[in-house]
Amino acid sequence: MSRLDLSLIEAALTTYIIARSKSNELWDEIGSTNDRAIELAHEGAAEGTLVLARQQTGGRGRQGRTWVSPADSGIFASLILRPTIDASALPLISFAAGVAAAQAIEHVLGLRIGLKWVNDLVYGGKKLGGILAEMPGSQTAAARATDSSDPKSPQWVMPPAVVLGIGINLRHNNDELPPELQGRVESLDRLSGKQVDANQIVAEFCNSLEDQYNNLRHSASEIVLAEWKHYSATLGKQIKATVGNEEVEGLAEDIAESGALVLRRNDGSEQLLYAGEISIRLQDGSYS
Ligand code: BTN
């Protein structure tokens, strides 16, 4: 079984920013890599800092859910970014991460996974991974850079951080999953029929993420969205979503420039969904 190893990952990087910090960390066990990355961001860690763990005891998913993270069962990674891009493009960072994950998996394993809005990694309707992008609150403590700052300019202020967390299932045992996840989870070992090299996946994810992040930094977010649509497992599908107290249904028609999902409701009207979870109608008429 391949175990996460920072030196192997660093040796396979082609990046300038992503995972190039001297403060990268790999933990045998941690509460949540996102929590640790938020802590490091507050302390002024440089853009690109990578926090990895072999196991999380308090892994967090979107919408306050738990991310079940037993030892060596998945890739648990968080990156600190300090984007100076237009605020309207910030939500697209998690789209960039979805694209990077899909590209990395295709590059390393030849497997074409799908992206389910807003940012689930899926295969055959089952969940293979997810992305949790967070903006740590007030960063007054990060005003003084402690990492990669110019020592001659101690007053240099770092841009606020976005912490980008990603979890990808490497292996799973259906019987050991909580009942609500049974039959709904996929993993790379099972899909590829071999033991996947997690270090290669992480390195390729970082390499692809740098390209996609550069697209956002150079105001070419349409490239990120086009790539996302290429891997989409959502567009063209009949979907259901809860917006406030209302359940809406219709065709997932497009992704707007903002990252919102363009829903063509069954009554013909158009609605933009900005956040939340959707379920996709399967061939048997049920929703997953
Ligand atoms: C989702 O709900 O789909 C998002 C899951 C994100 C899980 C990853 S695992 C690494 C990082 N640390 C966390 O606590 N969560 C993210």
Image (spheres, rainbow, N blue to C red):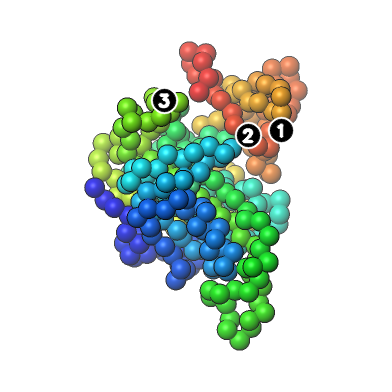
Whichever of labels 3 and 1 marks the residue nearer the N terminus, that label is: 3
Q: Earlier in the sequence, mark 3 or mark 2?
A: 3
Q: Residues within 10 Å of mark 2 (few under 14, many from 20)?
A: few
- Residue occupied by mark 3: 179
Q: Residue at x 56, y 75 (%)?
A: 146
Looking at the rendered structure, the kind of residue marked 2 is Gly
Q: Nearer the viewer, residue 232 or 194?
A: 194
**Classed neighbour count for the residue bearing mark 1: other residues with Cα under 10 Å, few (<14), some (14–19), many (≥20):** some
> Which residue occupies the extreme top position in the image?
284
Q: Is residue 123 above or below residue 154?
A: above
Element at label 3 = helix
Q: Secondary structure at mark 1?
A: strand
Q: Position of residue 208 (x, y in %)?
A: 46, 54
- Residue hosting label 1: 272
At a point 59% along the width and 28% down the height, the residue shown is 278
- The residue labelled by disc 2 is 276
Residue 64 to residue 88: above or below: above
The nearer-to-camera label among 3 and 1 is: 3
Q: Is residue 198 visible?
A: yes
Nearer the observer, 198 or 29: 29
Q: CA distance from mark 2 to mark 1?
A: 12 Å
Question: Given the current orientation, which residue lies at the most extreme right position?
Answer: 269
Measuring from the top left, give residue 51's x and y in whole percent.
45, 58
Give SS at disc 2: loop
Give the distance between the C-alpha atoms of the residues marked 3 and 2, in whole angstroms: 22 Å
